[in-house]
Image (cartoon, helix red, strand yellow):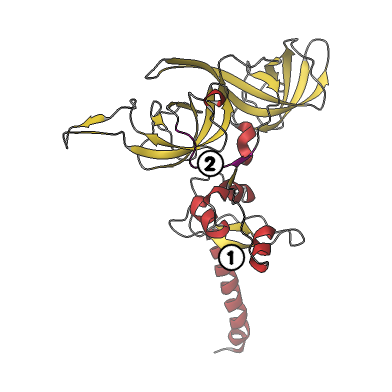
Amino acid sequence: MPVYEKRFAPLVFLIIIFTLTWLSQVCAGQKPEKFDTDQDTGFYYTIKKGDTLWDLSQKFYNSQWEWPGLWELNREIKNPHWIYPGNAIRVYLKHELKKQTIEKPVPKLVITRFNYPAIHRTGFIRKKQVTSLGTVLREKQGNILMATDDIVYIRPTGKAAFVCGHRYQIYSTAPVNRKTEKRRYKGIMHLVKAELEIIEVNTQYVVGKIKNSYRDVVSGDLVMDFYPRQPTLEVDEHPDPVDAVLLCSEDDTVLVNDYRIAFINKGAKDNIRPGDIYTIKCGNETESVYDVKTGLDIAPVTSGRLIVLHTEPESATVMVLSSTQDIHPGDIVN
């Protein structure tokens, strides 16, 4: 072998190794954010085939209810329903869990909590529409669809004065009119679209900046004061039975899939509380149904579970936790 070939052979080998390493990192998917070693304790976990955030939450935190927090820690995951083998996620080690392994355990009442950081962007149903403080007129540059960081002009209704620097929400409404077994339910669904900060107030109009948009904002959308909700819920897996019906999903879809936001026709007046977990059963009747194959009257089949995120007097906002069959508006909740 010529001398120059012997001299450059190690260099070529190193270049090949570097290239293969780089390609393997690219193929592994998007990297999670780095840990702040001064503040955080944790590790990286590589997703395997069949993993879900629900199962990983049980594996690392000994509680399936921690999955929304795990999702919040890994902002590169755009949809919690879809996580891909080979991608790495961050897993924090909780200080309180570490402390419990060192200290002698003390018997105490265990309270399961469910954390849902996105609670303030979920919709709700009321019998009457929330008082609108203003209407979105247009975007500063004339864009039809408005999103984060866009400047918008608002026509105030005069119901209350806008305050510069104050936090508001942009929303739209849609009527809900569904026949249930006992009576027809009528209400107004409020769909939260974005957060808004007021930057200028004058005698004719108000100027605001969209801080966070969850859905496209359009001309004619309404503005209300910020509606805070509690993101941490105390879970009750065995609440008192309730005879309720699934009214619709937040996006008005025919199928209500796992982790989708929906609404039921019972609320605080019926002693339903955030954190309550109920079962979902197929069908529109609470009575038994006739099964053609067996010739027997059988009870409606359980198709899934849901958790209550927020309650209004006569309705509740819920999230489907799991499903074994297709879930539709009109299904039984009890």
Q: Is residue 49 left or right of residue 17?
A: left
| Residue 234, magenta (yes or no) | yes
Q: Is residue 114 left or right of residue 37?
A: left
Q: Secondary structure at mark 2?
A: loop
Q: Residues within 10 Å of mark 2 (few under 14, many from 20)?
A: some
- In front here: 278 or 46? 278
What's the mark number on residue 321? none
Q: Which residue lies most toward the front here? A: 107
Residue 7, relative to residue 228: is it above or below?
A: below
Q: Is residue 188 left or right of residue 244?
A: right
- In front here: 267 or 219? 267
- In front here: 149 or 72? 72
Question: What residue is drawn where x is 68% and y is 19%?
Answer: 223
Counting from the top left corner in percent of width and height, residue 240 is at 48, 34
- For the residues labelled 1 and 2, the Cα–Cα distance comes to 48 Å
Residue 100, relative to residue 143: is it above or below?
A: below
Residue type of the residue flagged with mark 2: Asp
Q: Which residue is mark 1?
A: 22
The region drawn magenta spans: 231-241
